[in-house]
Image (tube, grey):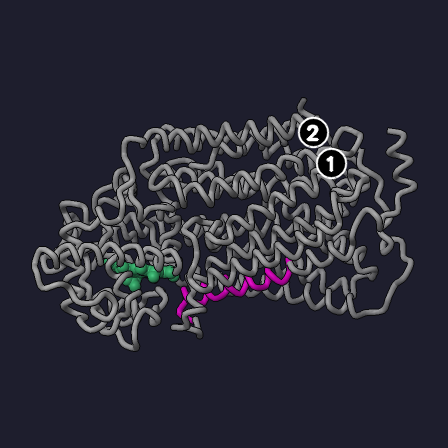
Amino acid sequence: MFESKSGVFFIGGLAFFFLAFASNALVPIYMYRDLPEQPVRKLVNENLLYQFEDLHKRYQEPFEAAYGTPPEDETEAEAWYADRCAEALLRGRTIYTGEGCWHCHSQFVRPVSREEDRWGPVAEVYEYQNELQRPVLFGTRRVGPDLSREGGRRSNDWHAVHFFRPKMLIPTSPMPEYTWLYDGSPDQPNADGLALITYVQWMGSWLHSYPYYERFEPISGTDSGME
Amino acid sequence: MSDAVLDRETIDPDQLVNRRLVALFFLMALVFLSVAILGGLLMALQLVHWNPLRGIELLSPGRWRMIHTNAVAYGFLANAFLGALEWSVPRMTLRPVASRALSWFIFVAWQVIVLSTAVGIMFGQAQGVEWGETPVWIDPVAMLGLILVMINFMVPIAQAKRPPYVALWYFIAPFIWPPLTYAMGNFMPQYWVSGTGGGALTGLFIHDLVGLFVTPLGWGLMYYFVPILLKKPIWSHGLSLVGFWGLAFFYPLSGIHHFLYTPIPMFLQYGAVVATIAIEFVVTTVVINFFGTIWGSGRMIVTSIPVRWFYTGMVFYFITCLQCALQVTLTFQKLIHFTDWVVGHAHLVMFGVFSFWLMGIMVYLFPRLIGREWYSRKLLEYHFWLSAVGLFVMFVDLGLAGVFQGFYWASLLPWDVSVEGSQPFWITRVFAGLSIVGGLLCFLYNLYRTYMGGYETSSESATGRIMPEPA
C-alpha cells in the first residue's frame, strides 16, 4: 500500500488532501454558517456616508464627473449617495487588490504586541463576513501600518495628498506614488482615486469608536502614539 | 525486472525524451526568473527611496511585487519542474510521455498562461489571493493546464510495470495535488467563501502550493538525480518512506499557520502549529537520508557543481524547516509576524532550496540537452557563489530586520521609526539581491557562449545515454 502507485495516489494524493481540507477549511466555514455574507450595499453606514458626501463637497468637479449629480429631493439624495458609495467601495477594493496594497498593509489587529493600543479593537469574525472580503484581505506583511481601523483617522484631503505623493506628508515614507489616480494634481482625484479614498475610509467605519478626524485625538496610554 | 533490463538496452533515449523541449522549458524558466528578479529589484529600490521609475502606472511597485512572486512560482519553478519531469519521468518509467504533441501544447499553453498572468497583474487585475494573484479570467485555463500535465505524465507512470521508485511517489501525488490546490485557492475564496473562513482557505492554499506542489516535486527530483550523480543508491529506503508519508500527512494540515492570531478559531490555529512542528521531525529524517547517501563521497560537493547546488539547497532546507518549527510558535509569531523575517524565510525556501536544486539540475542537464560542454566552469562557480552568498546575506539580513521591526512595533513608537530603522537592512538587501542578479547574469552568459560554442559531437554525455536506474 505505502509503495504502490494506487496507495500513493488515493491515500497520499486524495485522502490526506481532503482530510486537511475538511479540518482546516470546512470546519471554520461550517462554524460561521450563521454569519451570512453582507452585500456591499449593507456596508454603507452613516460614518462612511459622511465621508463620501465630504468627498463630494471637497472635490465637486471630479466627483460629479465620476458619479453625476445627486437628486434634489433629500430622501432620494440619501439613497443616491448610498448607492454610489457602494459602487465606490467595490471599485476601491479592486484597486486595493490590483495595486497590491495588501502586501504592505494588513487588515487585522492582533491581540498581542500592544496592537490594541496602536490601532484599536482586536479583529473579530463578523467584521470579515462581507462581500468586500471575498477574497479576504488579511494581508501578511506590514511595511505600512494596519489599515483595518483607518477610517476616520485621517481626512479625505490627507488621503488625497498622501496617495498622490506620500512623501509630501511623511518625508520618510517608502510608500509608492499613485499619480494615475489623479488628473494631474492632488486636488483632482479621478474616479479611481475617489473610490480608493472611500474604501480606506470604510475600514473600521462600522465601529462605535470611529474617529471623525475633526475630533481626532492621539491614542491614549502613551505619550508617543501615532504622531 | 528482466524485461526492464531488456528495455533499457534496446530503447533509444531520443525516443524517450524530447531534449529540445526540455531545453526550451529551462530557457523559459530562466526568462521568467529574470523577469521575477527585476520585479523584486523594483520593490527593493522603492523601499530605499531609489526607485527611478516612480509614478508610472504599469511599473507600480505593488503590482511588480506580485509579478515577482508569481513569475517565480509559475514562470520559473513550474517551467523548470516541467522540463525536469519531461526528462526524468520517461527515464524512470522507460515510457515516453502520453503524447509528444500534448507536451508541446502544454509548453506553449503554459507560457501563454504565465505571460498573461504577468500582463494582467501589470494592468492592475490581480486577484486578492497571495501566490494566486493570477487574474480570475486566467484561473480556469491554468486549471486546465494542470490537468493536462497530470494526464501527460500519469500515463507513462501507470504503464510502467515495476513498482515505482521513491521519486515517482513524489511525482504521482503532486500531479493530483496541484489541480486540487489550485481550484481550492483560486475559486472558493473568490466565489463562495468570504471573510474568516476564506482566510483559512487561502492560508491552506498558500501552504499547499509550497508543500504539495513545489516541495514534493523538488524532493522527487532529488531522489532521482542525487543517486545518479553520486553513482550510488539512496542510503535508506525506510527513511524515504517515513519522509514521503510524513510530508503527505502533516504538510497540508498546517495551512492555517499563515494566519495565526487572526479571528480563525484558536483550536484550529493550535492544530496547525502542532502539525508544523511535526513536519520538522519528518524533514530531519529526509535530510539525514540524503546526508547518509553522500557519506563517503563528500568531495563531490567540491568537484561536482550540480551536487554542490543540491546539497547546499538541502542545508538551506534544513535551516528553513528549523526556522518553521520555531517561528510557528505563538511566542515567536507575536514578534515576527508581518515583518521582514517572513520575507527572508520565503526567499530561503523558494530561492535557497528549490531554485538551487533546479539550478543544479540545469547545470547538469544543459550539456546533455544541447550536446556541448559548458563554456566555462569558472562562470558556473561564480554563478554558484554569487547566488549562495547573496541569498545567505539576504536571509540573515531580513531575519534581523524582522526582529527589529517586531520590537519597534511592540514598543509603540511611531510607525516612522520602524520604517527608518529598517533602512540599513533594506539597503543591504538591495546589494544582496544584486549579487544574485550577478550570478544569474554569469549563468545566462555562460549558457549563451555554450550554445554558440563549437560542437562536441558524439561525446558520451551529449548523446544522453540512459543512466542506470537507482536501485
Q: Would you say A11 lies left or right of A76 here?
A: right
In the picture, the quarter occupied by the C terminus of chain B is top right
Q: Would you say B121 lies left or right of B151 here?
A: left
Observer-nearest of A148 and B103: B103
Observer-nearest of B46 and B121: B121
The image position of residue A95, as x and y in percent, is 35, 60
Tell me what residue is drawn at x 81 percent, y 55 percent: B368
In the picture, the quarter occupied by the N terminus of chain B is top right
The image position of residue A48, as x and y in percent, is 18, 54
**In this orientation, does residue B427 appear?**
no
Tell me what residue is drawn at x 28 percent, y 70 percent: A190
The kind of residue on which mark 1 rests is Ile
The kind of residue on which mark 2 rests is Lys
The image position of residue B200, as x and y in percent, is 40, 37
In the displayed image of the protein, which residue is found farthest to the top?
A1
Judging from the image, mark 1 belongs to the subunit labelled: B
The image position of residue A213, as x and y in percent, is 14, 59
On the image, numbered disc 1 is attached to which residue? B157
Q: Residues within 10 Å of mark 2 (few under 14, many from 20)?
A: some
Q: Give the range drawn in magenta.
A: B29-50
**In this orientation, does residue B53 appear?**
yes
**Is B248 a magenta residue?**
no
* Contact (Cβ within 8 Å) of mark 2 with mark 1: yes
Q: Which label belongs to residue B18?
A: none
Q: Is the residue at mark 2 from the same chain as the one at mark 1? A: no
Q: Is residue B297 above or below residue B427?
A: above
Judging from the image, mark 2 belongs to the subunit labelled: A
On the image, numbered disc 2 is attached to which residue? A5
